Amino acid sequence: MRDALGYRAKFGVLGPSTNTIVQPEFDEMRPAGVTNHYSRIVIENAKAVSNESFMAGTKMIDEGTEEAVRGVMTCAPDYLVMGMSAVTFYGGAEGAQAWKNRIESVAGIGISMGSESVAAALQAIGSIKKIAFLSPYFPVANTEVKNYFSDHGYETVRDIPMQRPSWLGIAETPFSLTRDTVKKLDSDDVDAIIQVGTNLCMARLAPKLELELGKPVIAINTATYWHALRTFGITDKVEGFGRLLEEF
């Protein structure tokens, strides 16, 4: 017997308890017969006002992930989707793979995570060598993201850490500020623009910017959910979120 609503797939979704963007964005992307079941990684609203406090906050997210995995596994999901991104970039390609292996060993099922999903999205779109990216992070975390993309053969021409004042402050980022930040990154010397940081709301904004700039603009939540659907064998095209979900 299959689940009455999740008759095609039940996705377990993990995210920090302060994250208010992942859950609604993922729910907007889900095709009929796919359901999302959110498990919160309990953390405080850390005031990430420095490189050191930002990294300490993401370490707390990392330390709470396994407990959140065990919690969501009680609903017997078919697959896990990681709604946090910073920790999935740490340590370059090797560190990211080690993190994925650890979480999959706890879950006993496969996962899609932000770093790997964005790399897969770039490969699917093709003809991308030089990128620029924005994040709500602090510079030290942007360095980790840059190193990860370098390990996958992509040159980061520019990056902007928006240095949002707290975890909740990431979700409160005005769309105008996000748009202006993307415009600062764009130039003829970049093939694609990427947004990382899952609590930064950009899934609906990215396709509008793609049309305006005439190049791929990849929102990490879109890439991660796309990767989960395609990896699980669900090929439905979903409109309103840009080329990834509409074409690939």
Image (cartoon, rainbow, N blue to C red):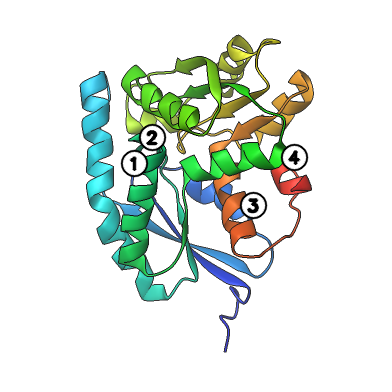
Instruction: Name the residue nearer the viewer: 102 or 73.
Output: 102
Quarter location, residue 141: top left
> Considering only vertical position in the picture, is 32 above or below 179?
below
- Residue in the picture at 58% in, 33% down: 202
SS for dot 3: helix
Residue designated by label 2: 92
- Residue in the picture at 74% in, 52% down: 238
Q: Residues within 10 Å of mark 1 (few under 14, many from 20)?
A: some
Question: Of label 3 and label 2, which has the lower sequence position?
Answer: 3
SS for dot 2: helix
Residue designated by label 4: 243
| Residue 183 x/y as whole percent | 63, 13
Question: Of label 1 and label 4, which has the lower sequence position?
Answer: 1
Closest to the camera, between mark 3 and mark 4, is 4
Image quarter hosting the N terminus: bottom right
Q: Are marks 1 and 2 in contact (CB under 8 Å)?
A: yes
Residue designated by label 3: 29
Residue designated by label 1: 95
> Considering only vertical position in the picture, is 126 above or below 80?
above
Closest to the camera, between mark 1 and mark 3, is 1
Closest to the camera, between mark 3 and mark 2, is 2
Q: Residues within 10 Å of mark 3 (few under 14, many from 20)?
A: many
Q: Residues within 10 Å of mark 4 (few under 14, many from 20)?
A: some
Residue type (three-letter) at the residue carrying disc 4: Arg
Question: Of label 3 and label 4, which has the lower sequence position?
Answer: 3
Instruction: Name the residue nearer the viewer: 107 or 36.
Output: 107
Instruction: Name the residue nearer the viewer: 220 or 89.
Output: 89
- Residue in the picture at 51% in, 22% down: 134
